[in-house]
Image (tube, rainbow, N blue to C red):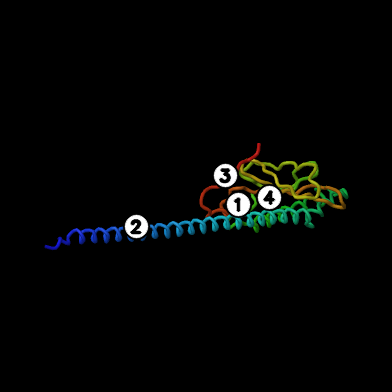
């Protein structure tokens, strides 16, 4: 009588089950591997986009600061301001011409303040014309309302460069010298708020920006 063939069928079934499990494990491992590399690629792409975004913002900030330096330089070299100091050096008084010169400077400051904007917000919160000794000669806006912040006297080592100064309370100033015939006559200062710059240039950047002010 021949031996029964059930054990062979059971063994064959077990081998098929093991083969099916091995194939399933291979497929799952492959899917995990593909998913891992896909996620890694997406992560690297996101990091690259974030880095590119920061670089673009950095260039925008550098351009913004360069434009503000150009603004105060242009104001310091304007005919209205150089003419005022030249007339004052000749002995002209407020009653005989200097007052009109200051009115022209006020209009010049107002034009710059109204035309320099970030979106709907004026870039400059204040513009000042100072004498060499720090005396305030003109300002925009003429009436600052609740803002009682006053100009600050620039350092004597200013030379012929634009100095950027953290004034505290969320304010930063750009100061350009007024030089006539190689002699320092005064200064032009443009003040602006950090927040208006942050709101406009970094408005859609995820996360937050921490700005600290030196004491």
Q: Residue at x 82, y 51 (%)?
A: 179
Contact, mark 3 vs mark 1 (Cβ under 8 Å): no
Q: Tag 2 or tag 1, which sits nearer the N-term?
A: 2
For label 2, the residue is 25
Per the image, the residue denoted by label 3 is: 210
Q: Which residue lies furthest to the left in this view?
A: 1
Left or right: 190 as drawn, with respect to 178? left
> Residue 23's image quarter?
bottom left
Q: Position of residue 56 (x, y in %)?
A: 60, 58
Q: Distance between the residues labelled 3 and 2?
A: 49 Å
For label 3, count other residues whose C-alpha is less than 10 Å away and answer few (under 14), some (14-19) or many (20+).
few
The CA span between labels 3 and 1 is 13 Å
Res. 95 visible in picture: yes
Q: In the image, is residue 131 above or below residue 113? A: above
Quick one: quadrant of the C terminus? top right
Q: How far apart are marks 1 and 2 (CA)?
A: 55 Å
The mark closer to the camera, 3 or 2, is 2
In this view, the residue in front, 70 or 37, is 37
Mark on residue 140? 4
Q: Residues within 10 Å of mark 1 (few under 14, many from 20)?
A: some
User: Callout 4: few (<14), some (14-19), or many (20+) C-alpha neighbours within 10 Å?
Assistant: many
Lower sequence index among marks 4 and 3: 4
Report if the CB atoms under discs 1 and 2 are less than 8 Å apart.
Answer: no
> Residue at (60%, 51%) from the top-left corner?
197
Which dot marks residue 197? Answer: 1
Q: Which of marks 3 and 1 is in front?
A: 3
State which mark lies toward you, 4 or 3.
3
Residue 171, which numbered label?
Answer: none
Q: Name the one closer to the observer, 184 or 55.
A: 55
């Amino acid at each position: 009588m021949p031996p029964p063939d059930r054990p062979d069928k059971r063994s064959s079934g077990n081998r098929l089950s093991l083969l099916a499990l091995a194939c399933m494990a291979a497929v799952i491992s492959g899917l995990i591997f593909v998913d891992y590399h896909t996620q890694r690629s997406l992560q690297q792409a996101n990091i690259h986009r974030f880095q590119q975004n920061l670089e673009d913002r950095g260039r925008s900030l550098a351009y913004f600061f360069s434009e503000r330096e150009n603004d105060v330089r242009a104001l310091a070299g304007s005919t209205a301001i150089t003419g005022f100091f030249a007339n004052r050096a000749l002995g002209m008084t407020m009653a005989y011409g200097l007052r009109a010169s200051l009115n022209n400077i006020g209009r010049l400051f107002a034009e710059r303040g109204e035309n320099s904007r970030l979106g709907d917000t004026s870039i400059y919160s204040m513009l000042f014309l100072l004498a060499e000794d720090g005396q305030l000669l003109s300002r925009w806006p003429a009436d600052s309302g609740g803002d009682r912040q006053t100009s600050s006297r620039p350092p004597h080592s200013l030379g012929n460069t634009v100095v950027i100064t953290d004034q505290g309370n969320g304010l930063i100033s750009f100061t350009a010298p007024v030089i006539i015939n190689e002699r320092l006559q005064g200064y032009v200062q443009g003040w602006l708020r950090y927040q208006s710059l942050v709101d406009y240039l970094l408005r859609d950047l995820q996360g937050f920006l921490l700005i600290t002010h030196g004491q």
